[in-house]
Image (tube, rainbow, N blue to C red):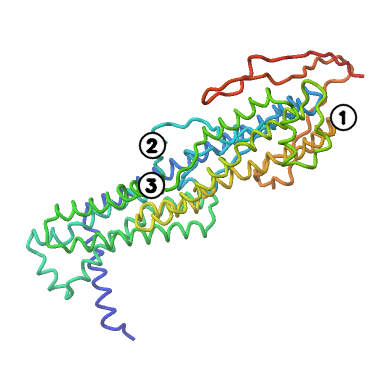
Amino acid sequence: MTAPPTFTHRWLELRREAAFVARDRSVWAWWLVVLCLSVLAVSAGQSEVSRQKATIARLVEADRVERSAVLAAHNDWGSAAYHGFHLTFDPPSDFAFAALGRRDDAAWKHRVRMLALEGQIHERDAGHPVLGLIGRFDFAFLAAYVLPLVLIVLIHDLRARERASGRHDLLVATAGSATRMWHLRAALRALGVFACAALPLGVAGALGGTAGSTLLLACASLMAYLLLWTVVCATLAAWRQAGEVILAALVGVWILLSVVVPAAGRMAIDRAVPIPSGAEIIMTQREAVNDAWDLPKAATMTAFVERHPQWAAYTAVERPFAWKWYFAFQQVGDQKAQALSAAYTEGRLERDRLAGWLAFIAPPALLQRSFQSLAQTDVRSSLAYEARVRAFHDSLREFYYPRLFRDEPFDRAALGDLPRTLHPWNGTPASARRSTRPSPPPSGRCCRTRSWRPPRRRSRGWGSRPSTATSRRWSTTVRCAR
């Protein structure tokens, strides 16, 4: 039984065009360029992800050791709460190497303690200013912005070159179709670009443990994106103009979709949805905390009890300094900045939502957003991490508030119940982990301990930070272990 003639004819056309493409050294050269660039982009992403994972592993161990030593050196709940730092982090996903996204300009690790949270959550390590401006060369950038240029170079002169050499009409007559031959040539070139780009991505994902569904979705998105650009290039390539004119027109389309529309849209979105800055939130919170030193303690406790009525019967402060009063005005500082913080979060979500609609008329931005969503490096993932940090900070307050307000005796063994970060690490659910209990001071000898009172600060400048080296009031006591 033989195949239908139409199928046989199309199969012969495909073989003929494949052989023609295989003899074109320029096509192979561009495919090799794409393969090398894909390997470079994937390697750069894997290197950055490995660096971040190594940093987290190192900080997790350092955090455990430091907190154990710090908590072992203090003998009251207030000092333990003040000096005890806790590491929170957002580990990169298995597909983060392909699209680093917001991990370049948003914080993915913090060291938080019982102080006001807003002054801590908006602080982050200073990144490289050049990377903050142009972004990092990862696979998402390669696919969204570089691959369309390669397709433009490969397809723009398919017909114009044959017209210039005088072979166009003969080729059309031989092929028997005015369009099918050109579509096959464009499709074969685009298929080679897709294979050279996707091969390193698939290999890296398989070696890195990326879910198969994630890789399939990424490859499907890449194929649909390259198909779109292949159609655009093949359509303009049919224009009866010189190859240089077609090339200039296609580059103009690329600039419009990749640069002009996203940049203009971002400016319009930023103007339409204004949001407060992180510095404004930090200063509002710190001003409230600094002002609390001059306010009557009753005023601070009244503002605190409005949000925490369960502690209304324990708000009496009869000493010049009490830890419950100190942490109460830290909480009040967060309350004063809560409206700004909520507006900041909601504004970022609204900007991201509008940017998602804008991406439908800017395909490069749409592809990048799809890759970042698969890699969990988009805006929503960053905000979800901030929400986990806030939830962890709330759990710290829930641990310490009963002990501070009820003046419970200090129990070092209870520190073993301190909450830990809300992230899985090394395969262990965070909810099942507890902090390592600090080692008690050596028995049978006198140990020298220091109880510390926070300094009274009146810094008003922008970006001011709590000082740890000035205005400290230390009272040294000696306690002998019985």
Q: Position of residue 378 (x, y in %)?
A: 49, 48
Work out how far the residue at label 1 is from the one at label 2, CA to CA, in angstroms.
53 Å
> Residue tagged by mark 1?
409
Nearer-N-terminus badge (1/3)? 3
Label 1: few (<14), some or many (≥20) within 10 Å?
few
Dot 3: element:
helix
Amino acid type at circle 1 is Pro
Q: Position of residue 41 (x, y in %)?
A: 40, 44
Amino acid type at circle 3 is Arg
Is 24 on the left-hand or right-hand side of 199? left
Q: Toward the viewer: 24 or 302?
A: 302
Dot 1: element:
loop
Is 468 on the left-hand or right-hand side of 159? right
> Residue tagged by mark 3?
266
> Residue tagged by mark 2?
133
| Residue depicted at x 38% and y 60% | 223
Work out how far the residue at label 3 is from the one at label 2, CA to CA, in angstroms.
14 Å
Q: Position of residue 69 (x, y in %)?
A: 74, 25
Which of the 4 quarters of the picture holds residue 414?
top right
